[in-house]
Image (tube, rainbow, N blue to C red):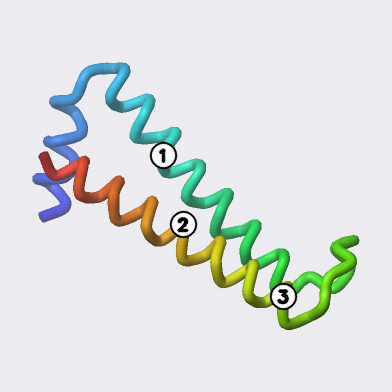
Amino acid sequence: MLKNIVDNIMKKSLKERFLLVLGILFFLIYLVLGLMIMFWDMLPLNMDPLYRYAFGVLLIVYSAIRFLRLINSNTE
């Protein structure tokens, strides 16, 4: 299965590979940002903890949606 994914990536043009890397980068950025907002107390956000956790979960769910879209577009 991994060999098929690697072969599929290598068949893509340079532009498509760049967009794939960019998509993975932004997935990781949203995931880390959501975790930082939820668990890093030193982050200077003046928010109620309930809203902090809700915003962090929202960012993590958004990153998961981006990841699923990236995986689905990669298999085509």
Across and down, in percent, residue 42 comes to: 89, 67
Q: Which residue is mark 1?
A: 23
Q: Which residue is mark 2?
A: 63
Q: Which residue is mark 3?
A: 51
Q: Nearer the viewer, residue 50 or 5?
A: 50
* Residue at mark 3 to residue at mark 2: CA–CA distance: 18 Å
Q: Nearer the viewer, residue 51 or 20?
A: 51
Quarter of the view holding residue 20? top left
Name the N-terminal-most of marks 3 and 1: 1
Across and down, in percent, residue 44 comes to: 90, 61
- The mark closer to the camera, 3 or 1, is 3
Decide: few, some or many residues near mark 2? Use Cα within 10 Å; few <14, some 14-19, many ≥20: many
Tell me the residue at 37%/58% (across/down): 65
Tell me the residue at 55%/59% (across/down): 31
Across and down, in percent, residue 9 comes to: 20, 34
Image quarter where the C terminus lies is: top left
Q: Secondary structure at mark 2?
A: helix
- The answer to the question of whether label 2 and label 1 lie on touching residues, with beta carbons closer than 8 A, is no
- The answer to the question of whether label 3 and label 2 lie on touching residues, with beta carbons closer than 8 A, is no
Decide: few, some or many residues near mark 3? Use Cα within 10 Å; few <14, some 14-19, many ≥20: few
Name the N-terminal-most of marks 2 and 1: 1
Quarter of the view holding residue 6? top left
* Residue at mark 3 to residue at mark 1: CA–CA distance: 27 Å
The amino acid at mark 1 is Gly
The amino acid at mark 2 is Ser
Q: Secondary structure at mark 3?
A: helix
Across and down, in percent, residue 46 comes to: 89, 66
- The answer to the question of whether label 3 and label 1 lie on touching residues, with beta carbons closer than 8 A, is no
Quarter of the view holding residue 4? top left
Tell me the residue at 70%/73% (across/down): 38
In the figure, is residue 41 to the left or right of 69? Answer: right
